[in-house]
Amino acid sequence: MSTVTITKTRTKTISDGLPQEQIISVETPQITAAKPVEVLPDLQTVLTLTVIVAICTYGLVEVLKSFTKKIRDLRHRNFYDGTIRLSAILIGAFIGFCLYGSVGGPGSAFPIGVACGAAAGILDVVIVKVVKARIRNAGTSREKNM
C-alpha cells in the first residue's frame, strides 16, 4: 500500500515578532480504484438461455391455457388474451432468473437472467401469435382458391 505525503508551509509570527516558517507534513494512504469486473455473459450463454426459457415458457403457458379454458369462453376474451401474454412474460422472467447461473452466466442473475427470460416470453408470445395467424389465413386462402 503506497502513501502520499502532503506538505504545506505556513508562516507564523512568534511572540518576539519575527516570522518563522513551520512545515506541516501529513501522510495519507493512496486510494486506488478497483478494476471493473466483467459481468456480461457471452452470446452463446444468452442464446442458450433464451431458447431454453422460450421452450419452457411455451409449455407452461399451454398448460395454463388448458386450466383456464372456461374463463376464456366467457365474455372477457381480450382480458384473457392479455393476461395470458403477461403471464408468458412473467413466467419467462422467473425461469430466466432461476436458470441463468445453471447455463453458465457470470455475475448476478437479476438483470441479465430476468431480461433474457422476459425477452424469451415476449418472443414466445409473438411467434405463437404469428404462427396462429398464418394458419388461419392459410385456411381461408385455400377456401377462396377452390
Image (tube, helix red, strand yellow):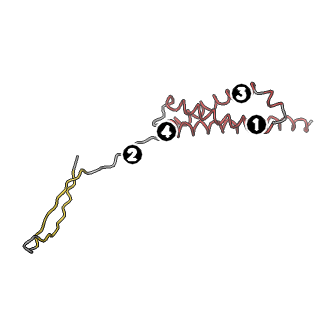
Distance between the Cα atoms at labels 4 and 3? 33 Å
- SS for dot 3: helix
Q: Is residue 81 left or right of residue 9?
A: right
Distance between the Cα atoms at labels 2 and 4? 17 Å
Labelled pair 1, 3 in contact (Cβ < 8 Å)? no
User: Type of residue at label 1?
Assistant: Asp
* Residue beneath the point at 15% across and 70% down: 11
State the residue lying farthest toward the bottom: 17
Labelled pair 2, 3 in contact (Cβ < 8 Å)? no
Horizontal and vertical percent position of residue 59: 67, 27
User: Type of residue at label 4?
Assistant: Asp
Q: Count of labels shown?
A: 4
Badge 1 density bin: few <14, some 14–19, many ≥20, Cα 10 Å: few
State the residue lying farthest toward the front: 15
* Residue beneath the point at 81% across and 36% down: 77
- SS for dot 4: loop
| Residue 81 disc label | 1
Q: Sequence order check: which comes first, mark 1 or mark 4? A: 4
Relative to the observer, which residue lies in front, 79 or 88? 79
Relative to the observer, which residue lies in front, 91 or 133? 91
Residue labelled with disc 4: 42
State the residue lying farthest toward the left: 16
Badge 4 density bin: few <14, some 14–19, many ≥20, Cα 10 Å: few
Labelled pair 1, 4 in contact (Cβ < 8 Å)? no
Residue labelled with disc 2: 36
Labelled pair 2, 4 in contact (Cβ < 8 Å)? no
Give the quadrant of residue 141. top right
Labelled pair 4, 3 in contact (Cβ < 8 Å)? no
Horizontal and vertical percent position of residue 80: 77, 35
* Residue beneath the point at 69% across and 29% down: 61
Horizontal and vertical percent position of residue 71: 79, 30
Distance between the Cα atoms at labels 1 and 4? 35 Å
